[in-house]
Amino acid sequence: MNIKDKGKYHYIWSVKLFEVNVRPPKSYINCKMSVYITESNRKKNLEPLADLEKGLEILEPFLKLYDFDFKGFEDFRGAGRHLTLAKFKNERREFILGYRFSVGQIVYQFDNLSVGHDFYLDKLGFGSKKKFEGIQTDDKLLPFKYILSDFDYLVDDFFEGECIRLQAYSKLQDNIIKEYDKKARKRYNSQFYELRILEARSAFINKNYKKSIEIYTSIDIKSVMNDLDEKLFEFCKRHL
């Protein structure tokens, strides 16, 4: 990954994805995976990124308290959509926040096991107490304040503990998703599959082609995949 400093935070662009002779879609060719790529996109995208940076400033003191370091932004574009991931990491633990026009996915990860914010808190028994519900609001910073409040429920297992429950819940979440009928899975899991795609791309970057294939194959909602994913999938099959 290449890293570029810009203001307080730095931006990661996934040029490494294309260092394996995989020809990406035209929209990806020679592009730095950042919202600051072109002047035409600059004005449109600066405001959401500014909101994201301000929101992260709310979360960062808490995360630093538990030795989570900011690892940068990772941007993904395709099929007319743009998603920015903000990543904080402490050794084997990682907090990932997905942002488009507002906070979307929130993921807690331990090694290769991950669980979503809602599922995690629900299983811990704090479903009725959690504040972040993923609802869009005119106050762009309010979701971050809600997330910060919810962090208190995750101290014992995620921030200070060994993520024992996270590991169990991650496997449970996978089993529940596998058991869902296709209609329910499409309604419930579009965001989850977007996360799985990011995991498949990460496995690809780490040259774990078998894992990447397994993840891509498990995705039933093919509409969340774009041309880049198809090319990565085909490349992985050829290089097992």
Image (tube, grey):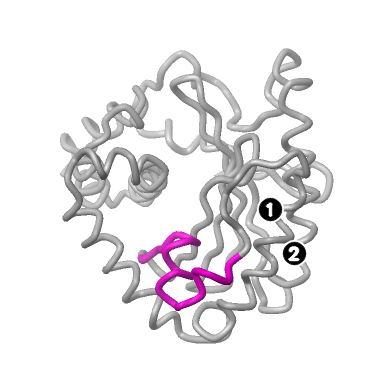
Q: Is residue 119 above or below residue 212?
A: below
Q: Is residue 129 above or below residue 135?
A: below
Res. 194 visible in picture: yes
Three-letter code for the amino acid on which mark 1 is drawn: Pro
The mark found on residue 191 in the picture is none
Q: Nearer the viewer, residue 19 or 119?
A: 119
Q: Residues within 10 Å of mark 1 (few under 14, many from 20)?
A: many
* Residue pointed to by mark 1: 143
Left or right for 184, reference 76: left
CA–CA distance in space, label 1 to label 2: 14 Å
Q: Nearer the viewer, residue 198 or 235?
A: 198
The residue under the point 74% across, 55% down is: 56
The residue under the point 53% across, 65% down is: 94
Q: How many marks?
A: 2
Residue 52 lies, in percent from the top left, at 72, 45
Q: Earlier in the sequence, mark 1 or mark 2?
A: 2
Q: Quadrant of residue 172?
A: bottom left
Three-letter code for the amino acid on which mark 2 is drawn: Glu
| Helix, strand or loop at mark 1 | helix
| Helix, strand or loop at mark 2 | helix
Q: Residues within 10 Å of mark 2 (few under 14, many from 20)?
A: some
Which portion, as a residue range, is magenta? Answer: 113-130
The residue under the point 70% across, 18% down is: 41
Residue 57 lies, in percent from the top left, at 79, 57
Name the residue furthest right.
7
Left or right for 113, reference 84: left
* Residue pointed to by mark 2: 60
Magenta region includes residue 117: yes
Left or right for 15, reference 229: right
